[in-house]
Image (cartoon, rainbow, N blue to C red):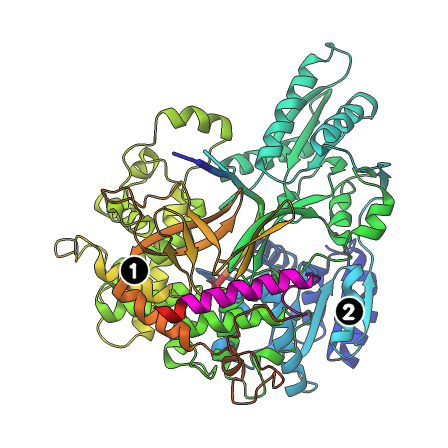
Amino acid sequence: MASHLPIVQFEDKIMKTVEDNAVVVIIGETGSGKSTQLSQMLHRRGYTKSGIIAVTQPRRVAAVSVARRVAQELGVTLGEEVGYAIRFEDRTSDLTRIKYLTDGVLLRESLSNPELNQYSVIILDEAHERSLNTDILLGLVKRLVKMRASKLKVLITSATLDGEKVSEFFSDCPVLNVPGKLYPVEILYSEERPKSYIESSLRTAMDIHVREPEGDVLIFMTGQDDIDKLVSKLDDRVQSLEEGSCMDAIIFPLHGSLPPELQAGLSFLLFVRVFSPPPPNCRRFIVATNIAETSLTVDGVVYVIDSGYVKQRQYNPSTGMYSLDIIQISKVQANQRAGRAGRTRPGKCYRLYSSEVYQEEFLDVTVPEIQRSSLAGSVLYLKSLDLPDIDILKFDFLDPPSFESLEDALKQLYLIDAIDDTGLITSVGQTMAELPLEPSLSRTLMEANENGCLSQALTVVAMLSAETTLLAGQSSKSNEKKRKHPPPDLPDGSGWGDHVQLLQIFEQWDQNEFDIGWCKDKGLQVRGMKFVKDVRRQLSQLMQKIAKGSLNVRTNERYKERQRDYKNLRKALCVGFANKLAERMVQHNGYRTIGFKPQLVQEKEGELLVEAFGMKLKVHPSSTLKTDEDGMFPNYVVYHELIATSRPYMRNVCAVEMPWVNPILKKLEKLNIDKLSGGSGHSIREESETKVSSLPKKEEAVTGVPDDRESRIQAARDRFLARKGKK
DNA sequence: GAGCACTGC
């Protein structure tokens, strides 16, 4: 059966340690079998007699496939003794003793059952990936262990570089090492950083192709653009090789925005490649994003080329803006990438950076998601648990988010009525927390339920949560061709913006009886649209359960009586997105955010330009928002997201009206962040005397900023306040 | 007038 897995030899030691300790950290490298074997060992030792063994996974596919394998190894039917639970799919029953689930599902479960009493063991697998949900679970589980004393067992799997830290977090609990089943990978460093990692990857790839024996090559790049460039350059170079001088080559791009069929196609090809005799004299090059680091395993890879970079999304709490930056990977990531070369036989990893860079510049571990996301949703969730001993600002995180980030979350929650001015969760907030949505979206649903447009709002919210998977996958080249023939007539949002457009798209699909052909005609991903339908159905059910009063969640009933200006819907969005409001600047179509600190906008030739209030933004060019007869955009919009790519853009905007905005501005004036952070009354920062507290504090907010810059910010603030006073 | 890595409830 699974006796060949390294972890099996350690069974006695692991079980003894688990018996003696409430929490154990297991360091298990790839291929150790920890994901499939730990649960079975515990099952054999009787831990399923007093409860269920829960094993969390950060990804849905992993939860399903691991559960399937364990059921197979135990010779039971999936869904009976061994089951899994992911969103929209609960394959467990009364018989279930081992349950695989996504970390998000376990987190949701703890809302209705804060003590997670049904579980005798909780295994947080892949904890080193540090997903937002796993990090919150780590804190909650630490608390549970204390409460439930010896009864609950917790196992946490992590990577080598992180194990000690996790152990410290759990009062120096034992750490066990389980070797993996990887073949040795020879690491080859470059002497220096190349000027262009595309060119350098190209050279290295061709070197391998010409000199090294057969075996596929996996190249880690940062994004679709680079991948496309490298793929075409590699193609050219391979074509130009003299025929017969070396083996053939096939080159594949691999990234998230490829249509899933293509990704599946690749796996299929790889499957054929691995399990049938390899095509004679042929080498494959897979040019991938970090999707190939963890999410997709590409078998047959012997050579890895690692650029040392990754594109990563991060949130800046002082501007409310996300940015996508190309940054250096961590040591953990570098090792994970290298490991991809050693799955089937000894391999080589070519690092396009020096060992000094690796040693001295790379962080040990990736910055956890919790330190680079907006925390509004997580903070609301923790507040809704109403655990008497939990103060969100003192919550025991493995890596605490910045104070600023927590304050930002509190401010946002206050603006959308989820917490009151002392930081206590409101009844509105409590209901919001029950919905599996970001706070702005759940607030929108609740407001829509009040003003009679719930059906529309459900559609918009569902569309937004699947938005990125909606447009049919397209390579950038074919896209360019398509640009001359714009996709067939999708609705335009009637000028009110993107939310209305999303609504109209779904309504049209509904009117076309959810026809798959219709999606294809309109260039929409069938899978994405089906997902929208699923989400919408789930949310409708939840709203029926949660919200008071009569509901109208059917899509087609209100078509005839619908307001042409979508006033109620836009109003609901304005209430829900009160924390994401922007004001158009006088005389032109740029906007600025409302409710954020003064920002350094740019620094030019030593001269510092300071925007008085908020960030300068533009409506994303892909938006359907329309200008009026004078060519001007609406005075106020709410946006779904701020993202800095080539410049700061608002993505998905909706026109809102001045009368709806006024109450938000009033609320902002009253905002007192110190009172908000006080929570149940005890202020966490008594020393603070700042009255307008949404301003950078010396030291913490703008580190390393010279004094004169600080004073310029101060001056900008003063000007702003003076201007405000005149109004 | 741009294009965005990857997850998840």
Left or right: residue A634 versus residue A273 is: left
Residue linked to disc 2: A165
**Does residue A234 lie above or below A430 as drawn?**
above
Q: How far across and how far down the image is residue A535, in percent?
A: 38, 57
Left or right: residue A337 versus residue A477 is: right
Residue under the point 43% across and 78% down: A419
Say which of A51 and A449 sits in front. A449
Mark 2, secondary structure of its residue: helix
**Does residue A132 lie above or below A654 as drawn?**
below
Left or right: residue A115 versus residue A186 is: left
Crowding at mark 2 (Cα within 10 Å: few <14, some 14-19, many 20+):
few
Say which of A170 and A25 sits in front. A170
Residue under the point 74% across and 18% down: A247
Say which of A642 and A165 sits in front. A642
- For the record, the magenta segment spans A698-723
- Rendering quarter of residue A443: bottom left
Q: Are marks 1 and 2 on the same chain?
A: yes
Q: Tell which residue pokes out farthest to the left in this image.
A: A560
Mark 1, secondary structure of its residue: helix
Quadrant of the snapshot with the C terminus of chain A:
bottom left
Q: How far across and how far down the image is residue A108, in percent?
A: 50, 71
Residue A715 magenta-drawn? yes
Which of the numbered marks, if any, corresponds to residue A40? none
Label 1 marks a residue whose chain is A
Which of the numbered marks, if any, corresponds to residue A457? 1
Tell me the CA gap for discs 1 and 2.
Answer: 44 Å
Residue under the point 37% across and 69% down: A726
Visible residue check, residue A397: yes
Mark 2: which amino acid? Answer: Lys
User: Are the two marked residues, 1 and 2, in contact with CB atoms closer than 8 angstroms?
Assistant: no
